[in-house]
Image (cartoon, rainbow, N blue to C red):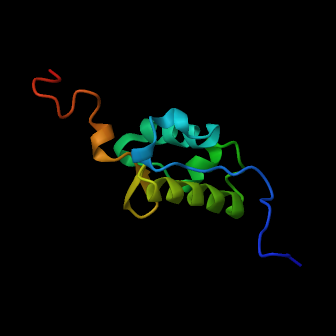
Amino acid sequence: MVVGGSRKPVGPRRAVPHRENAAGVEDLSVDYQAIMAAATAAGADGLGARRAAVVLGWDSASASRVEGARARLKRLVERGWLIEEKPGRFTLPAREQLGDDAGRPGGGS
């Protein structure tokens, strides 16, 4: 029974900041940084939940682990870090896929 309506968290909170409130990927936890690196490497093909589970070191044959990875990917979408243009395929937003020279006059070659 909870007295006073307040509960203490069970473990450490792994908050994912909204993209616009973060300085960069380094503001994410190690697991989320690994997912972002895998999404960057996947490029336009996108990152799937099964691959994300492997990146996290989880058993990709376990449905619960794959769903846990999918939940993390969806959380990154909700917070603006990734987009899901095709169901189940998670990619970086277009502005980040273009690189550092995008949007600058005379940038690139």
Does residue 22 lie above or below 106 as drawn?
below
Does residue 4 lie above or below 28 as drawn?
below
What number of labels is visible? 0
Q: Residue furthest top?
A: 109
Q: Residue furthest right?
A: 1
Residue at 80%, 61% in the rendered image: 8
Does residue 71 lie above or below 37 as drawn?
below
Residue at 57%, 59% in the rendered image: 70
Q: Residue furthest front?
A: 4
To which quarter of the image does residue 6 belong? Answer: bottom right
Q: Nearer the viewer, residue 52 or 24?
A: 24
Q: Position of residue 7 (x, y in %)?
A: 79, 67
Residue at 51%, 48% in the rendered image: 17
Q: Is residue 50 left or right of residue 89?
A: right
Quadrant in which the N terminus appears: bottom right
Residue at 39%, 46% in the rendered image: 20
Q: Nearer the viewer, residue 20 or 101?
A: 20
Q: Nearer the viewer, residue 7 or 104?
A: 7
Quadrant in which the C terminus appears: top left
Q: Position of residue 73 (x, y in %)?
A: 52, 54
Q: Is residue 17 left or right of residue 31?
A: left
